[in-house]
Amino acid sequence: MDIRVFDFIGKISFGVYVYHPLVIFLLYKTGFGFSESTVVNYILVYSFILVLIILIQKYHMIFLKKDLYCLRIILPT
């Protein structure tokens, strides 16, 4: 099966695993949305966290991995 969404999720899954504690910690320390205990607030906060993590990982894939791949070509192991 060639589903682009699943391919994208597969490519970013490790980065999401690595970055999610940092994003949650930083948002908690800034007090973003964790003050109220309502269902709507939880949905908004976790949706924002998910979008932010995906954007960070997308940036990581575009800029950092491309540069590291070029470095690997220049400096073979």
Image (tube, rainbow, N blue to C red):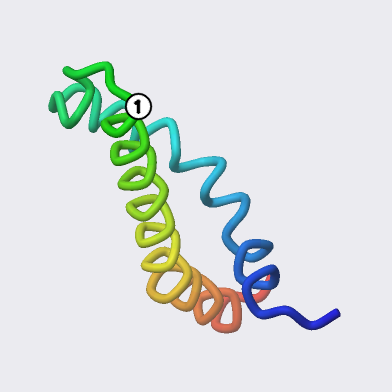
Q: Position of residue 7 (x, y in %)?
A: 69, 72
Q: Position of residue 53 (x, y in %)?
A: 40, 50
Element type at mark 1: helix
Q: Foreground residue, 74 or 16?
A: 16
Q: Amino acid at mark 1?
A: Val
Residue at the (36%, 62%) spot, across then down = 55
Q: Is residue 7 above or below residue 20?
A: below
Which residue has dot 1 on it?
Answer: 39
Instruction: Report the side of 64 relative to 8 (left or right).
Output: left
Q: Is residue 23 above or below residue 28?
A: below
Give the quadrant of the N terminus.
bottom right
Q: Foreground residue, 74 or 28?
A: 28
**Quadrant of residue 3 in the image?**
bottom right
Give the quadrant of the C terminus.
bottom right
Instruction: Report the side of 15 relative to 40 (left or right).
Output: right
Q: Foreground residue, 52 or 44?
A: 44
Q: Is residue 45 above or below residue 5?
A: above
Residue at the (55%, 82%) spot, across then down = 74
Residue at the (62%, 53%) spot, across then down = 13
Q: Foreground residue, 33 or 61?
A: 33
Q: Position of residue 66 (x, y in %)?
A: 48, 78
Instruction: Report the side of 14 relative to 63 (left or right).
Output: right
Residue at the (38%, 74%) spot, across then down = 63
**Quadrant of residue 56 in the image?**
bottom left
